[in-house]
């Protein structure tokens, strides 16, 4: 049975932990607010780019671009977005498990000889990914890509992926990340970045675009090829920001759970401390009363 001194020390330790988790929750809440605000600011730009693409597709013309060229997949590139820091619950574990499932599915679909390159974003995910490297599975770290990367870093990374695809170093580029819905809800997402699918582009056509024809200068195909890189960059920026928001949301929930557990433990410890203290006082009183009776 613990002594009063041991209980007091443990109460102090748990109280200190609760203060730390509460502070981390507040910091993550502020970062989550910032990431959510960035997502809102991205929406008009992405909407404008999709609107232009929609108007182009509404013309019914045939478009050609290296970014929409579909070919047999012999080399697949998967970009997985994780986190640099821990204490975010099962955030990285869930993404890694989803990554493993995707790799198994692609091998069954494309064959065991397909070459797969995984580019993890985040130290935690990178550490786990390097453990599954093999002859046909390469894990590549991009030094400037992490959870604190700037827009310029993200632009360079998008250009890197685009260059590899157009130079046929890889035949498809997929993204794996956590889609942000709210603080309490994030879902795993897996989508194709390159080649740009016709379905994804067609889905960007605004309502009524077919009934409002536009005149394009110099020509529709040139504008189409100019807008597609902007669409790529907007997609990558949105995915990166959603992943950042999901990470902070997961950390907020993890720290809230830790704080609640610490509070429950403190209540139990304080109850035990008070019982033991009261027991000691009662014992002392009985000893005093017993001595008086003997007299």
Image (cartoon, helix red, strand yellow):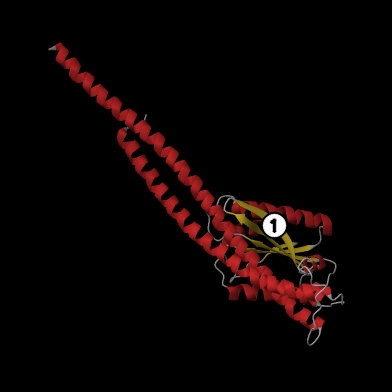
For residue 264, above or below residue 249 = above
Q: Is residue 52 left or right of residue 280?
A: right
Q: Is residue 245 above or below residue 265?
A: below
Q: How many marks?
A: 1
User: Quarter-wise, where is residue 134 in the image?
Assistant: bottom right
**Location of residue 151 in the rendering, given as x and y in whole percent from the top left corner:** 59, 73
Residue 256, placed above or below residue 194: above
- View extreme (left): residue: 295
What x and y, as percent, mark residue 180?
Answer: 62, 57
Q: Relative to 26, is 243 on the left or the right? A: right
SS assignment at label 1: strand
The residue at which mark 1 appears reads as 189
- Residue 65, x across and y down, in percent: 81, 77
Q: Name the residue located 29 percent from the left edge and 27 percent from the top edge.
A: 278
At 74% across and 56% down in the image, what residue appears?
103
Residue nearest the observer in this picture, 259 or 86: 259
The quarter of the rendered structure image containing the N terminus is top left
Q: Is residue 269 left or right of residue 285?
A: right
Badge 1 crowding class, 10 Å Cα cut-off, few under 14, some 14 to 19, many 20 or more, is some
Q: Residue at x 30, y 36 (%)?
A: 5
Query: Does any portion of residue 246 appear in the rendered image?
Result: yes
Q: Residue furthest bottom?
A: 218
Horizontal side, residue 152 vs residue 97: left or right: left
- Which image quadrant is residue 227 in? bottom right
Q: Please state which of residues 134 and 11 is positioned toward the viewer in this rendering.
A: 11
Foreground of the two, 58 or 11: 58
Comparing 205 with 124, the one in front is 205
Looking at the image, which residue is at 46% across and 55% down?
26
């Amino acid at each position: 049975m613990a002594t009063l001194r041991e209980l007091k020390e443990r109460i102090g330790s748990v109280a200190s932990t609760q203060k730390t988790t509460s502070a981390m929750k507040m910091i993550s809440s502020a970062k989550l607010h910032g990431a959510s605000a960035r997502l809102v600011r991205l929406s008009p730009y992405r909407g404008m780019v999709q609107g232009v693409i929609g108007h182009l597709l509404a013309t019914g013309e045939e478009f050609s671009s290296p970014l929409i060229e579909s070919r047999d997949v012999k080399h697949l590139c998967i970009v997985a977005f994780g986190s640099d820091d821990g204490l975010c619950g099962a955030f990285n574990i869930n993404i890694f498990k989803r990554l493993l499932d995707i790799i198994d599915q692609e091998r069954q679909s494309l064959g065991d000889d397909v070459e797969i390159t995984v580019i993890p974003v985040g130290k935690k995910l990178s550490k786990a990914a390097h453990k599954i490297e093999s002859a046909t599975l390469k894990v590549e770290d991009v030094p400037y890509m992490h959870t604190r990367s700037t827009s310029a870093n993200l632009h360079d990374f998008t250009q890197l992926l685009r260059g590899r695809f157009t130079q046929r170093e890889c035949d498809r580029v997929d993204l794996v990340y956590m889609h942000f819905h709210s603080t309490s809800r994030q879902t795993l997402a897996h989508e194709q970045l390159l080649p740009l699918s016709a379905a994804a582009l067609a889905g960007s056509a605004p309502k009524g675009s077919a009934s409002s024809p536009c005149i394009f200068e110099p020509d529709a195909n040139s504008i189409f090829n100019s807008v597609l890189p902007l669409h790529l960059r907007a997609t990558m920026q949105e995915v990166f920001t959603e992943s950042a928001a999901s990470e902070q949301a997961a950390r907020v929930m993890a720290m809230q759970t830790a704080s609640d557990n610490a509070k429950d433990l403190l209540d139990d410890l304080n109850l035990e401390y008070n019982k033991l203290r009261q027991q000691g006082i009662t014992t002392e009183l009985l000893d005093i009363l017993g001595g008086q009776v003997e007299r």
